[in-house]
Image (tube, rainbow, N blue to C red):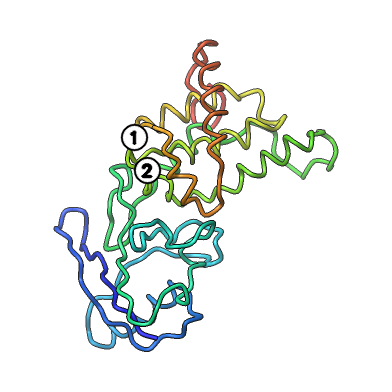
Amino acid sequence: MKVKLKVWRQKNAQSPGGFQTYESPALNANMSFLEMLDVVNEELANRGEEPIAFDHDCREGICGTCSLVIDGKPHGPHKGIATCQTYMRSFQDGDEIVVEPFRAKAFPLIKDLVVDRKAFDRIQHAGGFISVRTGSAPDANSILVPKADADLAMDAAQCIGCGACVAACKNASAMLFVAAKVSHLGLLPQGQPERYRRVKAMVEQMDTEGFGACTVTGSCEAVCPKEISLDFIARMNRDYGVALLKGEPKQVAGGAG
């Protein structure tokens, strides 16, 4: 099969960008989308042209770096998978595929399809941790966790921080990401001492980074490769309300505030 790619090319954040069209060489339908880009880049390099810059790492749907908008949808046409798990058999021979970077004020463009998502790291640093003594792993049952809480915590902990929720949201809101990171610690006994300081610090950092407000359209949940539920946003909002009523101080990164 062969496809036509309409790819966003931009040298850096200061330079103007635009779409460029490329004809792919013959492709195996079982290639992943990123493998297809590798093949196209090899062709470009052989012609002495600048390869398309795109982010990738594990290529197993774990790391969250494969941040591409494919035909208007973050990560591509399917539900519950990342870009690296999208295969060319999802498209037809001769299709034109539009490929863009994630677009959000808080994700400044670096080059072509690569954006800077360090805003997520700063939100994590603001409160996405627990203050415990380090050392050897504790005994398995030293702290008992009800199964319902453990299951919910694991559901939230699946978030890979890819940013698809932000890219899909008309307001570029990061609420689903922050809610997942807040909830998976807030549901566990180890996360209780800092529960309300954590949510306040992370929400305030999210606002500082310039992410938009949540208007509950559900677009974030629809494109999340791990299908994180909107219910976690409601849970975070409840905790944030309690934090405000308690007058919790802002937590300092690296320890309790």
- Residue displayed at 36% across by 49% down: 167
Q: Amino acid at mark 1?
A: Gly
* Number of the front mark, 2 or 1: 2
Q: Where 218 sits versus 58, above or below? A: above
Mark 2: which secondary structure? loop
Furthest residue to the left? 16
The disc label shown at residue 22, or none? none
The amino acid type found where label 2 is placed reads Cys
- Residue 179 percent coordinates (x, y): 52, 35
> What residue do we see at 44% from left, 65% from top?
56
Residue at image coords 33%, 54%: 115
| Mark seen at residue 169 | 2
In terms of image quadrants, where is residue 145? top right
**Mark 2 vs mark 1: which is more N-terminal?**
2
- In-image side of 199 versus 9 (left or right): right
- Residue shown at 55%/38% (left/top)? 181
Above/below status of 96 relative to 39? above
Residue 69 placement (x, y as % from top left):
36, 59
**Quadrant placement of the N terminus:** bottom left
- The quarter holding residue 146 reads top right
